[in-house]
Image (cartoon, coloured by chain):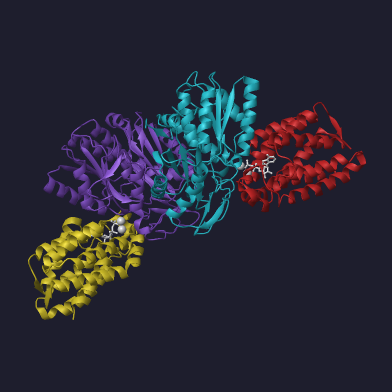
Chain colours: A cyan, B purple, C red, D yellow
Amino acid sequence: MKKIIDSPKNFVNDMLRGIYLAHPDKLTYVDDDMHAMVKKDITPGKVGIATGGGSGHLPLFLGYIGNGMLDGCSVGEVFQSSSAQQMLSVTKAVDSGAGVLYIFGNYGGDKLNFELSAEMADMENSIRVTSVIGKDDVATDNPENRRGVAGIFFVYKCAGAAAAEMLDLDEVTRIAQKAADNVRTMGVALTPCTIPRVGHPSFEIGEDEMELGMGIHGEPGVRRGQLTTASEIVTEMMEPILKDMQLSEGTEVAVLVNGLGSTPLEEQYLAYGHIHDILSACGLKVFHVYVGEFATAMEMAGFSISVFKLDDELKRLLAKPAATPFFIQPQL
Amino acid sequence: MKKIIDSPKNFVNDMLRGIYLAHPDKLTYVDDDMHAMVKKDITPGKVGIATGGGSGHLPLFLGYIGNGMLDGCSVGEVFQSSSAQQMLSVTKAVDSGAGVLYIFGNYGGDKLNFELSAEMADMENSIRVTSVIGKDDVATDNPENRRGVAGIFFVYKCAGAAAAEMLDLDEVTRIAQKAADNVRTMGVALTPCTIPRVGHPSFEIGEDEMELGMGIHGEPGVRRGQLTTASEIVTEMMEPILKDMQLSEGTEVAVLVNGLGSTPLEEQYLAYGHIHDILSACGLKVFHVYVGEFATAMEMAGFSISVFKLDDELKRLLAKPAATPFFIQPQL
Amino acid sequence: MQLTANDFVRLFQAWTEIINNNKDYLIKLDAIAGDGDLGLALTDGFNAVMASLEKAETDDIGMLFFQAGKTMSVYAPSSLGTLIAFGLMDAGKSMKGNKVISGCDLSVLLEEFESAIMKRGKAKPGEKTFLDGFDPAVCVLKAATSEDEIPAALRSAAMEAHHGAMSTVGMLAKYGRIAVRGEDSRQILDPGAVVASLMITALAETFAH
Amino acid sequence: MQLTANDFVRLFQAWTEIINNNKDYLIKLDAIAGDGDLGLALTDGFNAVMASLEKAETDDIGMLFFQAGKTMSVYAPSSLGTLIAFGLMDAGKSMKGNKVISGCDLSVLLEEFESAIMKRGKAKPGEKTFLDGFDPAVCVLKAATSEDEIPAALRSAAMEAHHGAMSTVGMLAKYGRIAVRGEDSRQILDPGAVVASLMITALAETFAH
Ligand SMILES: Nc1ncnc2c1ncn2[C@@H]1O[C@H](COP(=O)(O)OP(=O)(O)O)[C@@H](O)[C@H]1O
Ligand SMILES: Nc1ncnc2c1ncn2[C@@H]1O[C@H](COP(=O)(O)OP(=O)(O)O)[C@@H](O)[C@H]1O
Ligand SMILES: [Mg+2]
Ligand SMILES: [Mg+2]
Ligand SMILES: [Mg+2]
Ligand SMILES: [Mg+2]
């Protein structure tokens, strides 16, 4: 394991410490727990948006706390949910009377803990909480079982823009759900990653192999195969996305090419060339492209493609400016 | 070699194709050569700023073309300078009468070709050209021999902001030179990287080893040693930087923690915690911190630390907004 | 059989030990089935529970379980950690105020534990989860109606739990990370069911003599 | 010895071949000394030069070299590629208008080549660069004052170039990537000096009979 760390056990705390020191004017924490991260200035009367999840995916999840995006995030250990207590701390801190929307990925630990947190918030603090769950990974057939992966970025972005417009909780929730319903992702991994406390990679993969449909925690994928050309890989990844989305000609989409950790930006852009060709051939119009690391699995090599179907409302919200310590977008 | 590519030979062209397709409203090229990249809208009367260098360092170099930063970039093959012809193409395209400033790293190929390009621009096109060379890597003792690495980001940022204020070529050059004189960088590598056309890593390094002072092209460093803790590594990296800068107590600095490619953001932030402690202990004030990938070596693991000494002028210019397809900063 | 809070502290000790001893095994199983963190989450959880029980001085069995559940929920917020936390808390609620319970009450405790997990996790036995290691043991214990049957029932519960866990090979997963793999999930042993089997084994070793 | 443009096309062919044959070797040397791309840059450069010469039909030796230099500057814009481009262009300028040159003129050509590299690169022999393989050969050829000495001089130039390249081990680098390593640079063989030695070897093989 080759990592710039001090001790596997304190990895997440040490990382959080660095984040708070680097962005003292933007991020803070509540209840004396660095894992309960909130935006420094909460807009009064705005619907609060909270997320949460395991560490090891930066800039996911906490990186999207900021103007026009999220208000808080409960941070778990590497690849592990945070606790319901931590979620509740964040919930109370980001609520300013208009209620709180939870946006999180479709994982057992997160679901159970957010559910419990929502119950406690309701019972103990009379905070109204709604939830939208990201299930964008088309590597799984059954839509209910799909993992939440990089596509959650689009849900954050649109919900965050809606909340910034001071829409109410039902409206922000409706928009977040619509965004979640309109994004699909497919990923490929070339190398594994190592949980610091485990100390060795979670799986082995040959020097000439790739794994299609791999999760962002090193969960096994749907097909182990020869590492082929970028063009073939992209074609194989786009097929289930487009099949699942059934986009009619002329539809506008946004695209997210997401590096998993050690795949260079050069390769991500190279892949985008092929994605663009496929979308164009289907008569789809690309409104905007995001390329870079948005949801990683530490040092895993590989990337994912997310396609986000736009309508006028989602497009308008996606185009709004946003600024977090990890992600900045001007008005598009 | 595990890369998402189609053919090693066309790697750079295929990557450039993806970049132009992803950012059609921001970037274009001239003289029918994708390697001669220029900003889509050149501000009339503004000093043009051009850079150039080998591929494999994204977002360096071309990623800093945009508002408040650079106007053009000539793009070489992986780790190789572009040609003087390509530089000349860019120079002509970005000049709008106020002259052109070249900012590039201290490498033989780049120096020779930029020098020739400047001569041609002067002789054939009567374009006034000045040059500022980044030499920030304190891994080398002799300041004249120092490599240009991630610290060039600060030179781009300040020079770009100065040009955006419509200062003249001499002023923009003075500011760029001052920025270059006030930045120092030190890097460490944990793994090598592979030039696609070579197909195997440029060096070998043990599972428990690191290389201090490694260049961003896999050039050997100054010390090969045991991979120790983040705290010890950061201490060893900060020492030559601070020794070389001789900063008096109370001085304001900006810091850049730069990932070389496959070192996760988590580890970079963890390292920043230690950097912050060291700077604080020296009585230095951190004005702003940049953490992320700014100058990479494809999939190399490791990171660099740059410290940028501020005065009122540099601070004001650094704080100005900038927006490129790869880097966005609001007013600080 | 008369069980006091002290006996249940011994049980938590046994659970903590068996989970710690199988940490790497659980990591390995979860690396195949899911994300490879099960051994981390549960050792964190049980170690924290043990540390808190050593400090706490309650003789109320219900409070003991409830507190253990709360600690578990904080220190092991993974899927299974959280479900076990729910199980412990509900088991605790059902025993609230009791300072001594009989061997036969054990099955009530385990039933409450199981039904909390079913309520929260929504899975049923046969769906390749923790329940497939746990439910067979509960059934055996429920069938033991007199105190002197309990030691033997505990031993056979441990056997059944083990069989139950093994029988997850072949089952189709509907819950948890492994469910994303559809039909391919059948060939994989469910790590959580193994945890259940380990917990029942430790239960039997603690009380079956 | 009467050398026409055609003979120099043969020389470029020999240069291209010897560089291609040593591509991996040069990559390896440059990976130790610098960034490992020397074999790529120079094969790209010489292959492009050969391709352009096959099309171009000039009998002007000066133009031939000048064009080769321009092509080299476009296709091999690395440090050494660019320096060789300058060398070829200046050598070309010095021979402009000549359709035939003598064996003795070779030393003039090489001197112009070398002085362009010195002018642009600012290094002198002894500073661990290309020049340390090239300069010894130029000295030998300059010393040959009659045509019949030329073949032997070419052969001994190749020997001297080889010795010169080898003698870069021990020298302190002041230019190029290797210079960043200060005193540590001494133990390393300079890749560019090896290129010079290869070029002189191919020159001798082409003209020394
Ligand atoms: N809904 C559920 N009901 C019962 N057990 C479950 C459920 N979901 C998951 N599990 C159990 O949890 C185990 C995985 O636990 P854990 O590693 O904590 O999950 P994760 O890492 O996905 O949060 C599975 O092997 C399974 O036995
Ligand atoms: N100023 C110089 N003068 C002469 N030769 C030089 C000079 N600088 C570098 N070289 C030669 O160039 C070689 C490296 O060439 P190359 O790989 O093209 O450089 P880079 O990759 O740094 O652009 C060195 O081994 C050295 O012989
Ligand atoms: Mg987990
Ligand atoms: Mg080079
Ligand atoms: Mg798990
Ligand atoms: Mg080189």
- Locate residue D29 relative to residue B1 in the image: left or right: left
Percent from the top left, x then y, of residue C12? 75, 39
**Looking at the picture, does residue C192 appear above or below residue D121?**
above
List the single residue furthest toward the front. Answer: A249
Q: Is residue A46 above or below residue A297?
A: above
Instruction: Give the quarter the ligand 3 occupies.
Output: top right
Q: Which quadrant of the rendered structure holds the N terminus of chain B?
A: bottom left
Towards the viewer: A148 or B324: A148
Q: Position of residue A39 (x, y in %)?
A: 48, 27
Q: Is residue C141 left or right of residue A314?
A: right
Along the line of sight, the residue nearer the viewer: A63 or B108: A63
Assign the C terminus of chain B to one quadrant of the image: top left
The residue lying toward the viewer, choosing from C43 and A173, is A173
Furthest toward the left, the residue is D97
Q: Is residue B65 left or right of residue B269?
A: left
Confirm whether residue D71 shows in the render.
Answer: yes
Would you place residue B208 above or below residue A41 in this image?
Answer: below
Rendered image quadrant of residue B5: bottom left
The image quarter in which residue C14 lies:
top right
- Counting from the top left corner in percent of width and height, residue A328 is at 40, 33
Q: How many marks?
A: 0
Q: Who is closer to the viewer here, A225 or B101?
A: A225
Using the rendered view, name the quadrant where residue C56 is placed: top right
Percent position (x, y) of residue D105? 10, 71
Residue C52 visible within the image? no
Residue at 62% from the left image edge and 35% from the top image edge: A111
Q: Is residue A187 left or right of residue D68?
A: right
